[in-house]
Amino acid sequence: MKRTIVFFLGIILFYSCQKEPKEVSEIEVLEEEQPKIIEEFGFVLNDYKVIKDTIRKGESFGEILDRHHIDYPKIYKIAAAARDTFDIRRLRAGKPYTILAKNDSTELAQVFIYQPNLVEYLIVDFTDSIQTKFGRKEVKIVEKSATGIIESSLSEAIERQNLNYILALEMSDIYAWTIDFYHLQKGDNFKLIYEEKYINDTISVGVGNIKAAYFSHKDNPIYAFNFITDSTKNINDYYDENAKTLRRQFLKSPIKFSRISSRYNLRRRIKYYGNKVRAHRGTDFAANVGTPILSTANGTVTESRYKGGNGNYVKVKHNSTYSTQYLHMKKRAVKKGDYVKQGDVIGYVGMTGNTAGPHVCYRFWKNGSQVDPFKQKLPSADPIKENLKEDYFAYIAPLKSQIDSIPTSFLEKAVIRNVSP
């Protein structure tokens, strides 16, 4: 009997051992979420304690590093090593900086990054050896189109459309030789295709090129297309739809966005002198003290001095026929013998000499005599070369079609493209 029981127990044990083991419950393994890698200025910020601040008034480079646990002997070494790249005494109050410090209890500064503007930055890395270099953030260019209608002035039309004011200055340069911006008429209108620069896709860092423009003045449409005429030297200029240059040999005004307070008048009477006739052989442009005065054409400075009623003045000889003179300056920016280009700043509006208010008296000389510049038929600048015209017309065709399709009411479009920093 006992043998029988043992036999059956053996069989039971045998088969129980052959059964598949119970499945082990799967244990759900949760992957640890990895921190997001943050990179800026060429550094992985996760590796540091990041301190962002702005330069305070009167604050020095040494004070900043001292506050972040760098001793003065090392500060002197860092400042001396950085001198060839950047003079750290030129740190400007209000500009942002970043300290990358050790991510431990010491919080010892390792890197100093200074941002003089929104695009450029200076890195002073003293982790081991001392290294300094400049960097630039990636800039994206957004192509935009916009229009405006003149009610009172170009600047007012730009402001009304919430456009960048620099566009008004750029347009005044483009059309400086073809449109009198002191006598715009209500209803004049413009269209633009231009570039605006952005960092981080949202922060505007200024206006780029105006690729094409259209300005209807006194019902006279004037196109302007920016075209590179020498790719080696990167020389470009603006031409109309017939490949004619918009540039003239002389600017209409030595000051941007000023007003004429007194014109050339040989029979002008002045109360101050007993209402006697005192010829005015210049054109007065009123402007605030300190406003830049521009040379209206290329030439050589023949006089730069102070003299009697003229006050501080500059005279520029442009060629054997024409010279121009600029009186009553607060300060002269050029000296005798300097060569200046059209649009170069040669001085600043003031009240020196005989003057009742801040302005520049602009005098125009032709063959040694002072004449009214607004009554002269002045020559144009060099036209586009014949061998470039075919390329020019092919280049402007899509731009002209695009600008013609823009209605004369505010419109803005944007197409983003990357530009290497």
Image (tube, grey):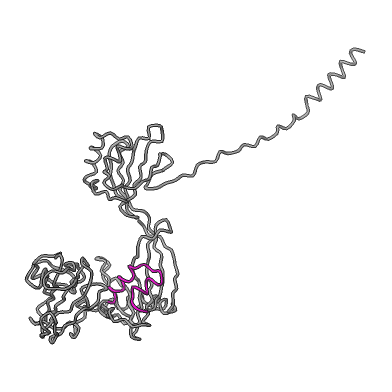
User: Which residue corresponds to the image point at 73% horizontal and 32% vertical from the top-left?
Assistant: 23
Count numbered badges in the picture.
0
Residues 160 and 249: in front is: 160
Residue 161 inside the magenta-drawn segment: yes
For the N terminus, give its image quadrant.
top right
- In the image, is 276 to the left or to the right of 32? left
Residues 136 and 98: in front is: 98
Q: Main secondary structure of the magenta part?
A: helix
Query: Which quarter of the figure has residue 151?
Result: bottom left
- In the image, is 348 to the left or to the right of 240? left
Residue 135 inside the magenta-drawn segment: no
User: Which residue corresponds to the image point at 35% horizontal and 65% vertical from the top-left?
Assistant: 207
User: Which residue corresponds to the image point at 44% horizontal and 79% vertical from the top-left?
Assistant: 407
For the C terminus, give its image quadrant.
bottom left
Magenta residues? 151-175
Q: Position of residue 197 (x, y in %)?
A: 37, 62
Query: Which quarter of the figure has residue 148?
Result: bottom left
Residues 329 and 385: in front is: 329
Farthest right residue in view: 1
Q: Position of residue 41 (x, y in %)?
A: 37, 48
Residues 63 and 410: in front is: 63
Q: Position of residue 210 (x, y in %)?
A: 34, 70
- In the image, is 28 to the left or to the right of 382? right
Q: Position of residue 314 (x, y in %)?
A: 12, 70
Examine the rendered structure and indicate whether residue 224 appears above or below residue 29: below
Query: Which quarter of the figure has residue 385?
Result: bottom left
